[in-house]
Image (cartoon, rainbow, N blue to C red):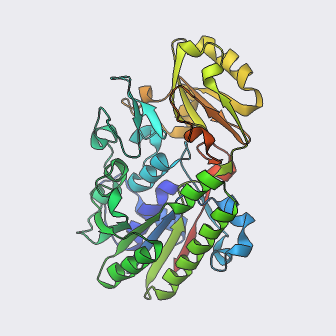
Amino acid sequence: MIPHLRQVLGGLCDAVGYSSTDPQDHWQRDRHALELPRVERAVLVLIDGMGAHQLAAHRGHLPYLRHHLDKYARTSLPSTTACAITTLGTGREPGRTGMVGYTARDPHSGERVQLISFPGAPLSPEAWQREPTIAERCEHEGTFCSVGPRKFSGSGLTRAAWRGVREVFAETLSERVEHTLREVRSGARLVYLYWAELDHVGHIHGPGSPHWTAELEAVDAALGELERRLPRSSALVVTSDHGMIPLTARLDVAHAPAADTFETAGEERFLHVYAQDAHALRAPLTDWLGQAGAVLTRDQAEAHLGAFAPHVRERVGDLVILARGTYGISDSRWMSPMQRALRGGHGSDSAAECEVPLVVRAL
């Protein structure tokens, strides 16, 4: 069985002996999916933008990871950070969390909401993402902490995905490794370490570029150091929120048929289309896209995002464009020139975007 990213944190909670206040949590099943025994403590490392397919293609650069690339997990759809990390932090799919893209439209105000930092959003992150997090549901008494940069403290995504986690601040990757080890030795039973730089480099320079490869090598070295220094009866789990593909061509929906009858949100590989007449628009939009994308109805999208909570349904586009190949589907009416110049992208349902590594080490 291939685990889903939503199972990972619950499985770790069971591995370290946390109990849940929610009878719907079946963490023992999740731990078995991870093939983890009970341990005294666990470290979960999430490297943003590190797909299983990209790792397999760069095994020669990975003296640590290349020995542990035999397993992978499936991430959420859309395969993008706000959705996937909230799925990890809650154990719930985007159809329930409402984290349905990099951006989504609030049906009440009509505003496009950016779901990483929620700048100027009409709803707070807690009102937008109503599902309790795993940290809120597990009885951890402060022994569950996250290690990340201070700038993420109180950020929108932190409040949506990690409510209830004790925050520990560290900036560089080596500092985060040191703080993680310090927390483990001080009695923390579950530590979450997050690193975003590989994703940033992949967007700007492209996955597989020399800059990206150098960053991947630094990540590999840090993970090897972390494992070597963890105490016995620890578990180390390494995964990611999504993979990435190079973007080599783009279409701009601002020039699509009947563009004045619809608005969009999301991102270039997963675009929500809010249309006055979705039924009439679907065929001409499909013809215009050709091989660059597939057009789903909202009901078809629900099969991929998970059953919609009532307040989430209208946040999803009347139509959804899944980009194909190495296309980006942009909208110059609101996407910045910088967004439309990125060399790496993610969000769609390709294996390169949705399959993430799952390194599970019981020490």
In the image, residue 345 above or below residue 113: below
- Say which residue appears at 31% left-offset and 77% top-offset: 188
Outermost front residue: 337
**Residue 3 visible in rendering:** no
**Placement of 45 over or under 37, stated as above or below:** above
Query: Who is closer to the viewer here, 326 or 93?
Result: 326
For the N terminus, give its image quadrant.
bottom right
Report the number of discs: 0
- Residue farthest to the right, as pictured: 291
Quarter of the view holding residue 18: bottom left
Q: Position of residue 268 (x, y in %)?
A: 60, 37
Q: Position of residue 225 (x, y in %)?
A: 52, 83
Query: In percent of the image, x 67 and y 20: which residue is there?
Result: 285
What residue is at 70 percent from the left and 22 percent from the top? 286
Q: Position of residue 243 (x, y in %)?
A: 61, 54
Between residue 81 and residue 356, name the one nearer to us. Answer: 81
Is residue 63 in view? yes
In the image, 225 versus 233, the foreground residue is 225
| Residue nearer the viewer, 125 or 41 | 125
The answer to whether residue 249 is left or right of residue 22 is right
Q: Position of residue 170 (x, y in %)?
A: 36, 71
Instruction: Residue at 61% x, 45% y: name it.
Output: 342
